Amino acid sequence: MLVISCHADTGFRFHQLTKLDRDVVEGHLDNFAGVYAVMQAYFSGKFQEDYAHIALTYGEEDDMAGAEEVLDTLRKHDVVIVVDVTGTKTKQDFVIEKCSDKKFFEALQEILKGMSFDIYEDCPDPIATEDEVDVYSEECPYTCMLAIPCWGGDYNEGVVKAKEASIQAVAQALVRIVENFPALCQKLGVVVS
């Protein structure tokens, strides 16, 4: 099974979003930008496979309770893609973090070839290093974060900026992962379920 996990909770008392010039949005993006990317991928009409599941979780800002509930439904060889924002500095459209399994790392590079991204085994995000990946990776080694780069402050505290092209690229990456999931499973040596 392929699980796309995205936290839909927020710690903000109010919300704002402003479209700026040159493909930039500014606002409370944690994790509205991630939810938006996941929904764009979903509404592309390319998520018709039974093996692709979306989990919009709660509690990521506090105790990861939503991710813990999703974890209870997973098996060891399920693949989990966490979609969130990151403060990792990059010139690429998106960042993949905490992709610690070598086969998974290489398979994602191949599936996403031609797209603009950085990929890391660890978490170079200077703002936060704890997230839902930490919950899922306890049981599922094929877990990583697909992250939308933000800048201009602490995304946990308030308003930051992101490129709309980054949100679109994450949606496209999700579609590509779903479309290539059987091949990904073959590379990982697991059965599509």
Image (cartoon, helix red, strand yellow):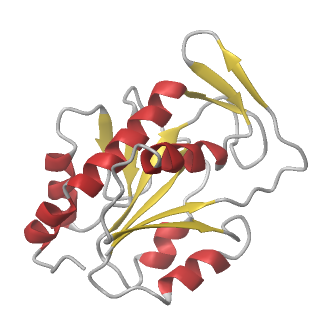
Quadrant (top left/top right/bottom left/bottom right) for the C terminus: bottom left
Q: Quadrant of residue 14?
A: top right
Residue 192 pos. (x, y %): 19, 76
At x 36%, y 50%, the residue is: 174
Vertical arrangement, residue 175 with respect to residue 28, above or below = below
Q: Is residue 11 left or right of residue 39?
A: right
At x 40%, y 76%, the residue is: 137
Residue 34 pos. (x, y %): 56, 48
At x 26%, y 47%, the residue is: 176
How many marks the image carries: the answer is: 0
Quadrant (top left/top right/bottom left/bottom right) for the N terminus: bottom left
Q: Is residue 4 visible?
A: yes
Q: Quadrant of residue 97?
A: bottom left
Vertical arrangement, residue 157 with respect to residue 160, above or below = below
Vertical arrangement, residue 30 with respect to residue 7, above or below = above
At x 29%, y 56%, the residue is: 178
Along the viewing direction, whichever of 162 and 33 lies nearer the viewer: 33
Residue 23 pos. (x, y %): 54, 17
Q: Is residue 154 left or right of residue 99?
A: right
Q: Is residue 125 visible?
A: no
Q: Is residue 105 left or right of residue 132?
A: left
Residue 168 pos. (x, y %): 44, 33
> Residue at the right extreme?
13
> Residue at the top extreme?
21
